[in-house]
Image (spheres, rainbow, N blue to C red):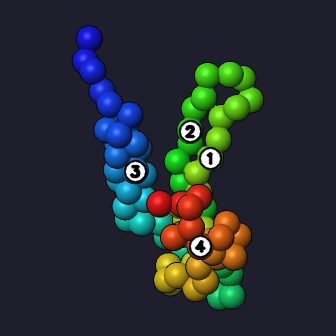
Amino acid sequence: MINVSKDNMVKLAYEMYEVVKDFLEGIIHMNWQGPNSKLAMIGGIMINCDKDGTDMFLPLMFELRSMQGQKVVDLFDEAYGPKGSLAFP
């Protein structure tokens, strides 16, 4: 059996988040939007727990994008608190 530390599992989860985020950045297109439309993007890590109903979501991104795909507003701090707080790495 392979011995994997909790630290390595945490690092893996964050790396996989970045892989998926980069993939989505590459495939998002805004051709369906009207001239004043915005796209809300929320991303993070699902934390699976042992008991039913105890799974959690660690938000890492919450932003609005314009029709050109550019970030218009970063809503993370307003919704979840500062990223440098104790709750977020």
Judged by depth in the image, the label closer to the viewer, 4 or 1, is 4
**Where is residue 27 shown, x and y percent of the image?**
42, 62
Judged by depth in the image, the label closer to the viewer, 4 or 2, is 4
Instruction: Report crowding for label 1: few under 14, some 14 to 19, many 20 or more residues within 10 A (C-alpha).
Output: few
Instruction: Report crowding for label 2: few under 14, some 14 to 19, many 20 or more residues within 10 A (C-alpha).
Output: few
Q: Which mark is residue 47?
A: 2
Residue sticking out furthest to the left: 2
Q: Considering only order in the chain, which callout, 2 or 3, is on the residue closer to the N terminus?
A: 3
Residue at 69% from the left image edge and 76% from the top image edge? 78
CB under 8 Å between callouts 4 and 2?
no
| Residue 12 vs residue 24, the one in the foreground | 12
Q: Is residue 4 visible?
A: yes
**Where is residue 77 shown, x and y percent of the image?**
63, 75
Q: Which mark is residue 57?
A: 1
Q: Which residue is mark 4?
A: 82
Q: Is residue 41 above or below residue 45?
A: below
Q: Considering only order in the chain, which callout, 1 or 4, is on the residue closer to the N terminus?
A: 1
Secondary structure, mark 2, is strand
Q: Considering only order in the chain, which callout, 4 or 3, is on the residue closer to the N terminus?
A: 3
Secondary structure, mark 1, is strand
| Residue 28 vs residue 84, the one in the foreground | 84
Type of amino acid under label 1: Phe
Q: Which mark is residue 3?
A: none
CB under 8 Å between callouts 3 and 2?
no
Quarter of the figure with residue 30: bottom right
**Where is residue 35 shown, x and y percent of the image?**
65, 88
CB under 8 Å between callouts 1 and 2?
yes
Q: Which residue is mark 3?
A: 14
Residue at 47% from the left image edge and 66% from the top image edge? 28
Type of amino acid under label 3: Tyr
From mark 1 to mark 2, how far is it between C-alphas? 6 Å
CB under 8 Å between callouts 3 and 1?
no
